[in-house]
Amino acid sequence: MKFSLRFNNDHPVSSYVRWAKLAESVGFNQFWVSNDLFFRSAPVILTAVALATEKIEIGTCILNPYSINPAEIAMMIATLDEVSNGRFNLGLSSGAEDFLNWIGVPYIKPRTAVIESTHAINQLLSGNRAAVEGEFLKWSGETYLRFTPRRRVPIYIGAMSPKMLEEIGRIADGGLPLLFPPEHYQNVIPLIEKGAREANRNIDQIDVAACIWCSVSEDKAAAEDALKEKVAYYGHALSESILQQIGLTHADFEAIEHAVMVENDIEKAKQLVTPPMLQIGIAGKTDDLIRRVEKLTNLGVKHISFGPPLGPNVEYAIEAIGRDVIPHFS
């Protein structure tokens, strides 16, 4: 079993360094940081983390080929792999259309963009030229790295839609399928298996991380309050198929989205989060977390990725998961 942590990029850099060192000490295998627009830069955060740790793998969840050109992504991750002594993983996907709309970036052919970018980045990091005449990328024969990368960095594809989930099985080294709620994994894994089968690949060789949200605390009300903020901010962006797992639709989030995006009132938005919406994640003590995660391991999950908010006290949550949850599933 593998265990990883995922963070949004909305904290001071020093916090990530502290959390990564703690995560490394209690047995986590990977440490991921998102790169959402207008927060702190994940590559900069991960550079600091790489210099402060020794064993834990680090990664972006996710970079997208719209706001960062795939050529620059390849440069960036090869350099981060060098800084981390071969501990870097690239989380790549198409990004959130809503967020890209803020900066006027057209969201065109998202699956094609990810497929072509994955192939191009793999070529560059393998020391090859990456001439591309595709639908998304049009690169000349001069596209190659002018330095020798340590290795071809593993690429994990982030996915929610069925077609993108298939691409995890078809072309990726690993997957970051968003499983809000955790029970959605039973719908996700057949799609990844389908992609792997069509590409004559063995899914056991693909590191599929079961990505969940959790909030751990001895105080259940405090744990739920921390989770409400994530649900309020991101719930409207989740796919209809994910929301259907708990009997919700995008219409249920309209008032919450308005409170967050238009009124900039996160407290009002949190008050609108209902108990069914909290089922998107897991909030409570480590026993509550173990019970829900056991449903995933019973389905064959071999990598659990615990995502934000983690809890009202992040250090406590990391220590508690390391103390109670990792040994239980190991």
Image: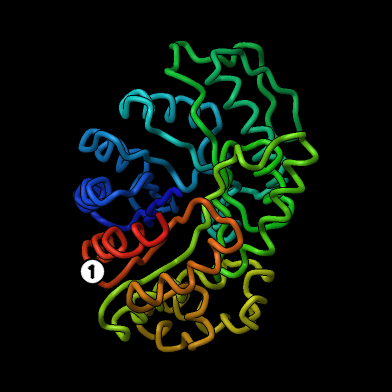
Q: Residue at x 66, y 42 (%)?
A: 203
Judge by depth and name the residue closer to the eye, 137 or 246.
Answer: 246
On the image, the x and y values in percent for residue 48 come to: 24, 38
On the image, the x and y values in percent for residue 87 come to: 37, 32
The coloring applied to the image is rainbow
Q: Residue at x 62, y 67 (%)?
A: 184
Q: Which image quarter: residue 80?
A: top left
Q: Which image quarter: residue 148?
A: top left
Residue 34 versus residue 117 in the image, above or below: below
Is residue 111 shown left or right of residue 228? right
On the image, the x and y values in percent for residue 210 come to: 53, 57
Residue 302 versus residue 279 in the image, above or below: above
Q: Residue at x 55, y 64 (%)?
A: 296
On the image, the x and y values in percent for residue 58 come to: 37, 40
> For mark 1, what is the residue?
313
Residue 18 versus residue 253 in the image, above or below: above
> Three-letter amino acid code at disc 1?
Asn
User: What is the tally of numbered marks visible in this picture?
Assistant: 1
Disc 1 on helix, strand or loop? loop
